[in-house]
Amino acid sequence: MKPTVLLTPGPLTTSAAVKQAMLQDLGTRDDEYRMIIQSLREQLCELGQVHPSQYALIFMQGSGTFGVESVLTSTIRQDEHVLILANGAYGNRMAQICETAHIPFTLKNYPMDKALPLDEVKEQIADPRYTHVAYVHCETTAGVMNDLYRIQECIRSYHKISIVDAMSSFGSAPIAIADAGIDYLITSANKCLHGVPGVAIIFARKAHLDTCPHCAVSLSLDLYEQYRSMEETQGAFRFTSPTHVMLALQEALTTLITNGGIPARRKRYMHVQKELHDSMTKYGFHTLVEPDVQSCVITTYLCPKGFDFTHFYNFFKAHGFLLYAGKLPGIDAFRIGNIGEISDADILHFKKVLRMYMEENR
Protein backbone atom coordinates (compact mmCIF):
# COMPACT_ATOMS: atom_id res chain seq x y z
CA MET A 1 0.00 0.00 0.00
CA LYS A 2 1.20 3.49 -0.84
CA PRO A 3 1.89 5.96 2.00
CA THR A 4 -1.22 8.08 2.41
CA VAL A 5 -1.97 11.39 4.14
CA LEU A 6 -5.39 11.19 5.79
CA LEU A 7 -7.27 14.47 5.44
CA THR A 8 -10.08 13.10 7.60
CA PRO A 9 -11.36 13.72 11.16
CA GLY A 10 -9.81 10.47 12.40
CA PRO A 11 -8.28 8.00 12.14
CA LEU A 12 -5.51 10.30 11.05
CA THR A 13 -1.93 10.29 9.86
CA THR A 14 0.33 9.32 12.76
CA SER A 15 3.99 10.07 13.27
CA ALA A 16 6.78 7.57 12.75
CA ALA A 17 7.47 7.71 16.50
CA VAL A 18 3.89 6.71 17.33
CA LYS A 19 4.09 3.81 14.89
CA GLN A 20 7.46 2.78 16.32
CA ALA A 21 6.07 2.74 19.87
CA MET A 22 3.70 -0.09 18.93
CA LEU A 23 6.53 -2.49 18.11
CA GLN A 24 6.96 -3.43 21.77
CA ASP A 25 4.97 -6.21 23.47
CA LEU A 26 3.85 -5.87 27.08
CA GLY A 27 1.83 -8.02 29.48
CA THR A 28 -1.39 -6.41 30.66
CA ARG A 29 -0.77 -7.28 34.33
CA ASP A 30 2.88 -6.25 34.49
CA ASP A 31 3.78 -3.47 36.91
CA GLU A 32 5.58 -1.61 34.11
CA TYR A 33 2.44 -1.51 32.01
CA ARG A 34 0.22 -0.40 34.89
CA MET A 35 2.66 2.43 35.57
CA ILE A 36 2.26 3.55 31.96
CA ILE A 37 -1.53 3.55 32.32
CA GLN A 38 -1.37 5.52 35.55
CA SER A 39 0.99 8.06 33.99
CA LEU A 40 -1.35 8.48 31.02
CA ARG A 41 -4.29 9.05 33.37
CA GLU A 42 -2.35 11.76 35.21
CA GLN A 43 -1.22 13.48 32.01
CA LEU A 44 -4.73 13.51 30.58
CA CYS A 45 -6.14 14.96 33.81
CA GLU A 46 -3.65 17.81 33.46
CA LEU A 47 -4.63 18.37 29.83
CA GLY A 48 -8.31 18.35 30.78
CA GLN A 49 -7.67 20.72 33.68
CA VAL A 50 -9.20 18.44 36.31
CA HIS A 51 -7.94 17.22 39.67
CA PRO A 52 -7.87 13.42 40.22
CA SER A 53 -9.60 13.86 43.56
CA GLN A 54 -12.70 15.15 41.75
CA TYR A 55 -12.55 13.41 38.37
CA ALA A 56 -11.71 9.90 37.27
CA LEU A 57 -9.91 9.30 33.99
CA ILE A 58 -11.18 6.01 32.61
CA PHE A 59 -10.06 4.16 29.50
CA MET A 60 -12.57 2.02 27.64
CA GLN A 61 -11.51 -0.43 24.95
CA GLY A 62 -12.93 0.34 21.51
CA SER A 63 -13.70 3.36 19.37
CA GLY A 64 -14.97 6.70 20.62
CA THR A 65 -18.54 5.49 20.14
CA PHE A 66 -17.82 2.71 22.64
CA GLY A 67 -16.96 5.42 25.15
CA VAL A 68 -20.14 7.38 24.43
CA GLU A 69 -22.21 4.21 24.73
CA SER A 70 -20.46 3.31 27.97
CA VAL A 71 -21.40 6.64 29.55
CA LEU A 72 -25.00 6.66 28.29
CA THR A 73 -25.67 3.06 29.33
CA SER A 74 -23.91 3.29 32.70
CA THR A 75 -25.10 6.59 34.18
CA ILE A 76 -28.81 6.95 33.31
CA ARG A 77 -31.39 4.93 35.24
CA GLN A 78 -34.83 3.88 34.00
CA ASP A 79 -36.51 6.54 36.14
CA GLU A 80 -34.29 9.25 34.59
CA HIS A 81 -34.42 10.92 31.17
CA VAL A 82 -31.70 12.31 28.89
CA LEU A 83 -32.19 15.22 26.52
CA ILE A 84 -30.03 14.85 23.40
CA LEU A 85 -29.22 18.07 21.54
CA ALA A 86 -28.18 17.13 18.01
CA ASN A 87 -26.95 19.16 15.05
CA GLY A 88 -25.31 16.30 13.19
CA ALA A 89 -24.89 12.56 12.77
CA TYR A 90 -23.04 12.02 16.04
CA GLY A 91 -25.76 13.56 18.18
CA ASN A 92 -28.22 11.30 16.37
CA ARG A 93 -25.96 8.35 17.11
CA MET A 94 -26.44 9.05 20.82
CA ALA A 95 -30.17 8.65 20.26
CA GLN A 96 -29.57 5.33 18.47
CA ILE A 97 -27.59 4.10 21.47
CA CYS A 98 -30.35 5.08 23.89
CA GLU A 99 -33.05 3.54 21.73
CA THR A 100 -31.16 0.26 21.44
CA ALA A 101 -30.46 0.12 25.18
CA HIS A 102 -34.01 1.21 26.13
CA ILE A 103 -32.76 4.33 27.92
CA PRO A 104 -35.41 7.06 28.28
CA PHE A 105 -34.44 9.91 25.94
CA THR A 106 -35.73 12.83 23.93
CA LEU A 107 -33.94 13.89 20.75
CA LYS A 108 -34.04 17.52 19.65
CA ASN A 109 -32.63 18.02 16.16
CA TYR A 110 -31.26 21.34 14.88
CA PRO A 111 -29.73 22.38 11.51
CA MET A 112 -26.44 20.60 10.82
CA ASP A 113 -24.67 23.61 9.34
CA LYS A 114 -25.21 25.86 12.36
CA ALA A 115 -24.26 25.83 16.03
CA LEU A 116 -26.87 24.76 18.57
CA PRO A 117 -29.15 27.79 19.14
CA LEU A 118 -28.61 28.85 22.74
CA ASP A 119 -32.03 30.37 23.40
CA GLU A 120 -33.86 27.29 22.15
CA VAL A 121 -31.41 24.98 23.91
CA LYS A 122 -31.91 26.77 27.21
CA GLU A 123 -35.67 26.41 26.91
CA GLN A 124 -35.30 22.66 26.33
CA ILE A 125 -32.84 22.18 29.20
CA ALA A 126 -35.23 23.93 31.58
CA ASP A 127 -37.83 21.18 31.12
CA PRO A 128 -38.05 19.37 34.50
CA ARG A 129 -38.48 15.99 32.79
CA TYR A 130 -34.82 15.87 31.89
CA THR A 131 -32.16 14.72 34.36
CA HIS A 132 -29.27 14.55 31.86
CA VAL A 133 -28.27 16.59 28.80
CA ALA A 134 -26.03 15.15 26.07
CA TYR A 135 -24.52 16.92 23.06
CA VAL A 136 -21.51 16.98 20.73
CA HIS A 137 -18.95 19.77 21.16
CA CYS A 138 -17.37 19.63 17.69
CA GLU A 139 -19.87 18.12 15.27
CA THR A 140 -17.75 16.92 12.35
CA THR A 141 -20.80 16.13 10.20
CA ALA A 142 -20.45 19.70 8.89
CA GLY A 143 -17.50 20.94 10.95
CA VAL A 144 -19.46 23.05 13.46
CA MET A 145 -18.21 24.07 16.91
CA ASN A 146 -20.98 24.33 19.50
CA ASP A 147 -20.61 26.83 22.34
CA LEU A 148 -19.59 24.45 25.10
CA TYR A 149 -19.20 26.97 27.91
CA ARG A 150 -22.55 28.70 27.37
CA ILE A 151 -24.38 25.39 27.00
CA GLN A 152 -22.74 24.22 30.20
CA GLU A 153 -23.90 27.39 31.98
CA CYS A 154 -27.47 26.46 31.09
CA ILE A 155 -27.05 22.86 32.18
CA ARG A 156 -25.52 23.88 35.52
CA SER A 157 -28.17 26.49 36.19
CA TYR A 158 -30.88 23.81 35.97
CA HIS A 159 -28.84 21.22 37.91
CA LYS A 160 -28.70 18.61 35.14
CA ILE A 161 -25.97 16.03 34.50
CA SER A 162 -23.95 16.85 31.37
CA ILE A 163 -22.56 14.32 28.88
CA VAL A 164 -20.25 15.85 26.27
CA ASP A 165 -18.96 14.11 23.17
CA ALA A 166 -15.63 15.91 22.72
CA MET A 167 -14.29 13.34 20.29
CA SER A 168 -12.99 15.87 17.76
CA SER A 169 -12.47 18.86 20.04
CA PHE A 170 -10.35 17.58 22.93
CA GLY A 171 -6.79 18.36 21.89
CA SER A 172 -7.81 20.92 19.26
CA ALA A 173 -8.79 23.56 21.82
CA PRO A 174 -8.16 23.94 25.57
CA ILE A 175 -11.16 22.65 27.55
CA ALA A 176 -11.31 23.40 31.28
CA ILE A 177 -13.55 20.46 32.17
CA ALA A 178 -13.92 21.23 35.88
CA ASP A 179 -14.44 24.97 35.40
CA ALA A 180 -17.10 24.28 32.78
CA GLY A 181 -18.90 21.96 35.17
CA ILE A 182 -18.86 19.00 32.79
CA ASP A 183 -19.88 15.73 34.43
CA TYR A 184 -18.82 13.36 31.65
CA LEU A 185 -16.57 14.13 28.68
CA ILE A 186 -15.61 11.52 26.11
CA THR A 187 -12.83 11.63 23.54
CA SER A 188 -10.68 9.14 21.66
CA ALA A 189 -6.98 8.39 21.26
CA ASN A 190 -7.14 8.58 17.46
CA LYS A 191 -8.42 12.13 17.10
CA CYS A 192 -6.62 15.32 18.13
CA LEU A 193 -4.29 13.45 20.50
CA HIS A 194 -2.71 11.81 17.40
CA GLY A 195 -2.78 8.25 18.71
CA VAL A 196 -4.27 5.21 16.96
CA PRO A 197 -7.79 3.73 17.10
CA GLY A 198 -8.64 1.32 19.88
CA VAL A 199 -9.38 3.17 23.12
CA ALA A 200 -11.90 5.77 24.27
CA ILE A 201 -11.01 8.27 27.00
CA ILE A 202 -13.62 9.29 29.56
CA PHE A 203 -13.46 12.05 32.16
CA ALA A 204 -16.07 11.38 34.85
CA ARG A 205 -17.01 13.47 37.87
CA LYS A 206 -16.55 11.09 40.80
CA ALA A 207 -19.38 12.62 42.84
CA HIS A 208 -21.86 11.41 40.21
CA LEU A 209 -20.11 8.25 39.03
CA ASP A 210 -20.00 6.98 42.62
CA THR A 211 -23.81 6.90 42.53
CA CYS A 212 -23.87 4.58 39.50
CA PRO A 213 -22.99 1.04 40.68
CA HIS A 214 -25.28 -1.62 39.13
CA CYS A 215 -26.67 0.99 36.69
CA ALA A 216 -25.08 -0.34 33.50
CA VAL A 217 -27.01 -2.44 31.00
CA SER A 218 -23.78 -3.90 29.56
CA LEU A 219 -21.07 -6.04 31.13
CA SER A 220 -18.09 -4.96 29.04
CA LEU A 221 -19.12 -1.29 28.80
CA ASP A 222 -19.91 -0.88 32.49
CA LEU A 223 -18.20 2.45 33.22
CA TYR A 224 -18.48 2.21 36.99
CA GLU A 225 -16.86 -1.22 37.11
CA GLN A 226 -14.09 -0.11 34.75
CA TYR A 227 -13.51 2.90 37.00
CA ARG A 228 -13.48 0.75 40.13
CA SER A 229 -10.98 -1.66 38.56
CA MET A 230 -8.59 1.13 37.51
CA GLU A 231 -8.79 2.77 40.93
CA GLU A 232 -8.34 -0.40 42.98
CA THR A 233 -5.68 -2.07 40.84
CA GLN A 234 -3.73 1.06 39.88
CA GLY A 235 -4.55 1.12 36.21
CA ALA A 236 -5.56 -2.40 35.26
CA PHE A 237 -8.30 -2.93 32.67
CA ARG A 238 -11.01 -5.46 33.58
CA PHE A 239 -10.68 -7.27 30.26
CA THR A 240 -7.87 -7.53 27.70
CA SER A 241 -6.14 -4.18 27.41
CA PRO A 242 -5.19 -2.69 24.00
CA THR A 243 -1.48 -2.63 24.95
CA HIS A 244 -0.10 -1.40 21.62
CA VAL A 245 -2.74 1.33 21.41
CA MET A 246 -1.75 2.55 24.88
CA LEU A 247 1.94 2.59 23.99
CA ALA A 248 1.08 4.65 20.91
CA LEU A 249 -0.94 7.04 23.09
CA GLN A 250 1.98 7.40 25.49
CA GLU A 251 4.23 8.52 22.64
CA ALA A 252 1.54 10.77 21.18
CA LEU A 253 1.00 12.57 24.51
CA THR A 254 4.73 12.99 24.99
CA THR A 255 4.93 14.65 21.57
CA LEU A 256 1.91 16.85 22.28
CA ILE A 257 3.28 18.10 25.60
CA THR A 258 6.85 18.54 24.31
CA ASN A 259 5.68 20.59 21.34
CA GLY A 260 3.77 23.18 23.37
CA GLY A 261 0.58 21.40 24.39
CA ILE A 262 -2.94 22.00 23.14
CA PRO A 263 -2.54 25.74 22.32
CA ALA A 264 0.35 24.97 19.97
CA ARG A 265 -1.57 22.12 18.35
CA ARG A 266 -4.58 24.36 17.78
CA LYS A 267 -2.33 26.94 16.14
CA ARG A 268 -0.95 24.25 13.83
CA TYR A 269 -4.42 23.06 12.86
CA MET A 270 -5.49 26.59 12.02
CA HIS A 271 -2.39 27.04 9.88
CA VAL A 272 -3.05 23.82 7.96
CA GLN A 273 -6.71 24.72 7.52
CA LYS A 274 -5.89 28.18 6.18
CA GLU A 275 -3.33 26.87 3.71
CA LEU A 276 -5.68 24.21 2.35
CA HIS A 277 -8.65 26.57 2.36
CA ASP A 278 -6.78 29.28 0.44
CA SER A 279 -6.08 26.76 -2.30
CA MET A 280 -9.66 25.53 -2.40
CA THR A 281 -11.16 29.02 -2.64
CA LYS A 282 -8.67 29.92 -5.37
CA TYR A 283 -10.40 27.34 -7.53
CA GLY A 284 -13.92 28.41 -6.65
CA PHE A 285 -14.88 26.01 -3.86
CA HIS A 286 -17.16 27.45 -1.18
CA THR A 287 -17.61 26.37 2.44
CA LEU A 288 -20.92 25.33 3.98
CA VAL A 289 -20.34 26.60 7.54
CA GLU A 290 -20.05 30.25 8.55
CA PRO A 291 -16.58 31.28 9.83
CA ASP A 292 -17.75 32.16 13.36
CA VAL A 293 -18.73 28.54 14.11
CA GLN A 294 -16.22 26.79 11.82
CA SER A 295 -14.14 24.13 13.55
CA CYS A 296 -10.39 24.00 12.91
CA VAL A 297 -10.65 20.20 12.69
CA ILE A 298 -12.52 19.73 9.42
CA THR A 299 -14.00 21.91 6.67
CA THR A 300 -17.05 21.12 4.52
CA TYR A 301 -16.99 22.26 0.89
CA LEU A 302 -20.04 22.45 -1.35
CA CYS A 303 -19.79 20.54 -4.60
CA PRO A 304 -20.01 22.90 -7.62
CA LYS A 305 -22.58 22.14 -10.28
CA GLY A 306 -21.44 19.21 -12.39
CA PHE A 307 -18.67 18.29 -9.92
CA ASP A 308 -17.95 14.55 -9.55
CA PHE A 309 -16.64 13.97 -6.01
CA THR A 310 -15.87 10.28 -6.66
CA HIS A 311 -13.57 11.25 -9.52
CA PHE A 312 -12.01 14.00 -7.37
CA TYR A 313 -11.54 11.54 -4.48
CA ASN A 314 -9.91 8.89 -6.64
CA PHE A 315 -7.56 11.43 -8.22
CA PHE A 316 -6.35 12.57 -4.80
CA LYS A 317 -6.11 9.00 -3.54
CA ALA A 318 -3.88 8.12 -6.49
CA HIS A 319 -1.61 11.00 -5.44
CA GLY A 320 -1.41 10.07 -1.76
CA PHE A 321 -4.37 11.81 -0.06
CA LEU A 322 -7.62 10.49 1.41
CA LEU A 323 -10.49 12.97 1.57
CA TYR A 324 -13.85 12.57 3.33
CA ALA A 325 -17.28 12.30 1.72
CA GLY A 326 -20.18 14.42 2.93
CA LYS A 327 -22.78 13.14 5.42
CA LEU A 328 -25.41 15.86 5.15
CA PRO A 329 -28.80 14.74 3.83
CA GLY A 330 -29.83 16.74 0.79
CA ILE A 331 -26.54 18.68 0.59
CA ASP A 332 -23.97 17.73 -2.03
CA ALA A 333 -20.68 18.33 -0.21
CA PHE A 334 -17.40 16.80 0.90
CA ARG A 335 -14.99 17.38 3.77
CA ILE A 336 -11.26 17.99 4.21
CA GLY A 337 -9.69 17.35 7.61
CA ASN A 338 -6.83 19.37 9.08
CA ILE A 339 -5.66 17.14 11.95
CA GLY A 340 -2.88 14.61 12.30
CA GLU A 341 0.75 14.72 11.28
CA ILE A 342 0.35 16.92 8.20
CA SER A 343 3.66 18.47 7.23
CA ASP A 344 4.40 21.61 5.23
CA ALA A 345 5.60 19.33 2.44
CA ASP A 346 2.19 17.58 2.50
CA ILE A 347 0.48 20.97 2.17
CA LEU A 348 2.61 21.89 -0.84
CA HIS A 349 1.91 18.52 -2.43
CA PHE A 350 -1.85 18.96 -1.84
CA LYS A 351 -1.74 22.32 -3.61
CA LYS A 352 0.13 20.77 -6.53
CA VAL A 353 -2.37 17.89 -6.84
CA LEU A 354 -5.31 20.29 -6.66
CA ARG A 355 -3.79 22.44 -9.41
CA MET A 356 -3.20 19.36 -11.55
CA TYR A 357 -6.78 18.20 -11.09
CA MET A 358 -8.30 21.58 -11.89
CA GLU A 359 -6.16 22.04 -14.98
CA GLU A 360 -7.20 18.62 -16.26
CA ASN A 361 -10.89 18.95 -15.37
CA ARG A 362 -11.94 22.55 -15.88
Image (cartoon, grey):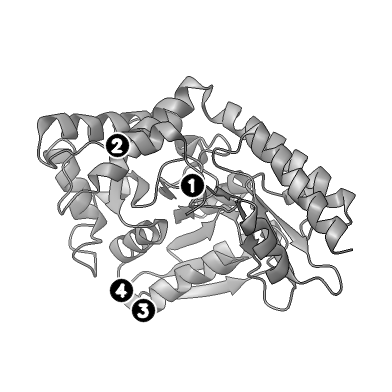
Q: Element type at marker 4?
A: loop
Q: Which residue is mark 2?
A: 247
Residue 191: image tag: 1
Q: Which residue is mark 3?
A: 100
Which residue type carries mark 2?
Leu
Q: Position of residue 13 (x, y in %)?
A: 51, 44
Q: Element type at marker 3?
A: helix
- Quarter-wise, where is residue 160 in the image? bottom left
* Marks 2 and 1, the one that precedes in the sequence: 1
Q: Position of residue 133 (x, y in %)?
A: 48, 61
Tell me the mark number nearer the camera, choosing from 4 and 2: 2
Which residue type carries mark 4?
Gln
Q: CA distance from mark 1 to mark 3?
A: 26 Å
Q: Which residue is mark 4?
A: 78
* Marks 1 and 3, the one that precedes in the sequence: 3
Q: CA distance from mark 3 to mark 4?
A: 14 Å
Q: CA distance from mark 2 to mark 3?
A: 33 Å
Contact between marks 4 and 2 (CB within 8 A): the answer is no
User: Is the residue marked by circle 3 packed among few (<14), some (14-19), or many (20+) residues within 10 Å?
Assistant: few
Q: Is residue 186 above or below residue 135?
A: above
Q: Position of residue 267 (x, y in %)?
A: 65, 31
Contact between marks 2 and 3 (CB within 8 A): the answer is no
Q: Position of residue 305 (x, y in %)?
A: 87, 73
